Image (cartoon, rainbow, N blue to C red):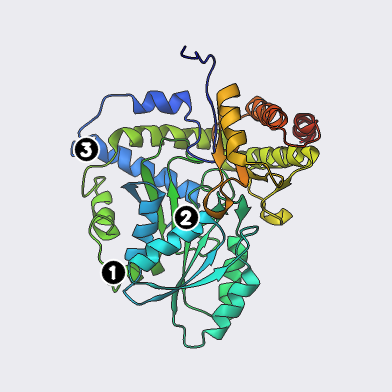
Amino acid sequence: MVRTRTGRHFLQLPGPSNVPDRVLRAISRGTIDHRGPDFPALTRALIEGLRAVFRTDSAVVMYPASGTGGWEAALVNTLSPGDRVLMFETGQFALNWIHVARRFGVHVDVIETDWRRGADPALLEERLRDDRGHTFRAVALVHNETSTGAMTRIAEARRAINRAGHPALLLVDAVSSVGCMDYRHDEWGVDVTIAASQKGLMLPPGLAFLAISAKAQAASRTAALPRSYWDWNPMLASNADGFFPYTPSTNLLFGLRESLAMLEEEGLEQVFCRHARYGRAARSAVQAWGLSTQCERADEQSDVLTTVVMPQGHDADRFRGLVHDRFNMSLGTGLGKLKGRVFRIGHVGDFNDLMLAGTLAGVESGLALSGVPIRRGGVDAALRSLEQS
């Protein structure tokens, strides 16, 4: 007998996030000619909207791609074979970016962590001070590591680079933070910021975005890594006239226009405050259950997801399977060396108080049904946190 599921599926991943009905309706409109006379107005409006979200006056480009494509674009447009890059292994996505760089023949110096915190600005400064010959061409950091729920303090990282007097480019993966957490490309002195459509921008996967400083554009003129599809110079040239050098994801661009309008209507500061409320409330629930989060530092806890550590002897994926079958809810799996050891609760994008309450109710009930030793009351603790804020 086939089991019938009623109600709406709870997609509580840290991305892809829930796509609002407004955005879905925008995407469903008829495709237009991307070489036609109506297209430039759309392109220009999107670039200006993205600049506001990145908080930049610099160039912004859009690729039909995932965030992984954004990683590659950032590397091949700024680096040459054999260049040295300093990277922190703060989680699975940082590790994946390291692998991409190495496959291009870039020499990556990796500072390993225990995957329970972001990149350490003091250690970054120390390593750059030791590089008296300025051999590091770039520093590459993940702002919000969605495998661990730990955030790197990018503003402090920039101050560390400045104190060391080092000219390295600063490349930042902000895929899961742009549009939902405070991020300031210009003020923080970032040279390339990478974002994507499926997190705070509330779209399906399929678009990657780069904000590019003047320093990064200058670096691209001498960068010698192979590039064709990812070359941002043809993209910048075509965008100046409102077009693209190849076929864009036209209908996703319609959705992007709507999602940018939603962010503008709510106001970025309110968007950031809303996500911060959900982060605090979710962590209140975890604490009430007697469990712990993967991120250990209070000032590095992510606002867009909560990564929960399962007690010894209990399998996180078995628990996730029970929650999916019993409550029609998807929670994030543990990635890499955290597989089976953690589960991830997404609270990002088009999200409200009752959605969080329902999510945490499913988690609490699922933990109890899985035989995980917890104290009840996590949902109540989260509700109190929301009421007090």
User: Residue 221 sits in which quadrant?
Assistant: bottom left
Residue 163 visible here: no
Residue contact between numbered discs 2 and 3, judged by CB atoms under 8 Å? no
**Left or right placement of residue 322 versus residue 22 in this view:** right
Say whether disc 2 or disc 3 marks the residue closer to the N-terminus: 3
Residue at position x 27%, y 50% from top?
A: 239
Q: What amino acid is at disc 1?
A: Leu
Say whether disc 2 or disc 1 marks the residue closer to the N-terminus: 2
Q: Position of residue 200 (x, y in %)?
A: 51, 41
Residue at position x 71%, y 57% from top?
A: 297
Residue 68 visible here: yes
Helix, strand or loop for disc 1: loop
Say whether disc 3 or disc 1 marks the residue closer to the N-terminus: 3
Q: Nearer the viewer, residue 48 or 154?
A: 154
Q: Which mark is residue 225?
A: 1
In three-dimensional space, the C-alpha distance between marks 2 and 1, rounded to whole angstroms, equals 26 Å
In three-dimensional space, the C-alpha distance between marks 2 and 3, rounded to whole angstroms, equals 26 Å
Q: Position of residue 353 (x, y in %)?
A: 67, 28
Query: What crowding class fits label 3: few (fewer than 14 Cα within 10 Å), some (14-19), or many (20 or more)?
Result: some
User: Residue 249 sits in which quadrant?
Assistant: top left
Q: Position of residue 143 (x, y in %)?
A: 55, 56
Q: Which residue is mark 2?
A: 56
Q: Which mark is residue 259?
A: none
Q: What amino acid is at disc 2?
A: Thr
Whether residue 266 is situated above or below residue 299 in the rendered picture: above
Whether residue 162 is situated above or below residue 371 in the rendered picture: below
Question: Which mark's residue is nearer the viewer, 2 or 1?
Answer: 1
Helix, strand or loop for disc 2: loop
Q: Quadrant of the C terminus?
A: top right
Q: What amino acid is at disc 3?
A: His
Q: Which residue is mark 3?
A: 34
Helix, strand or loop for disc 3: loop
